[in-house]
Amino acid sequence: MPNWLKNQLSQAFLTKNVNQLKVLNQCWFFYKRKQHSNGG
């Protein structure tokens, strides 16, 4: 997981920002799927 995403996630958890968590979660799944399709 990239550092910027970790930082955003921990910040969202601390502030209990549910909307931000949902968006970041989608970003992470998209990122993972993209990496997987690239063979990485």
Image (spheres, rainbow, N blue to C red):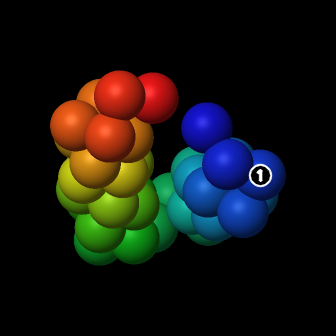
Q: Quick check: 40 above or below 6?
A: above
- Percent from the top left, x then y, of residue 27? 33, 60
Q: 28 or 16, which is in the foreground?
A: 28
Which residue is rendered at x = 32% and y = 40% of the image?
A: 38
Write down the residue under mark 1: 3
Q: Quick check: 12 above or below 2?
A: below
User: Which image quarter is the C terminus in?
Assistant: top left
Q: 33 or 23, which is in the foreground?
A: 33
> On the rendered structure, is 12 left or right of 2?
left
Q: 39 or 21, which is in the foreground?
A: 39
- Percent from the top left, x then y, of residue 26? 24, 56
- Percent from the top left, x then y, of residue 14? 68, 55
> On the rendered structure, is 28 left or right of 30?
right
> On the rendered structure, is 17 left or right of 18?
right
Badge 1 amino acid: Asn
- For residue 16, say whether it is visible: yes
Q: How many marks?
A: 1
User: Which image quarter is the N terminus in?
Assistant: top right
Q: Secondary structure at mark 1?
A: helix
> On the rendered structure, is 23 left or right of 28?
left
Q: Residue furthest front?
A: 39
Label 1 neighbourhood size at 10 Å, few (<14), some (14-19), many (20+)? Answer: few
Which residue is rendered at x = 35% and y = 28% of the image?
A: 39
Q: Quick check: 25 above or below 36?
A: below
- Percent from the top left, x then y, of residue 17? 45, 67
- For residue 25, say whether it is visible: no
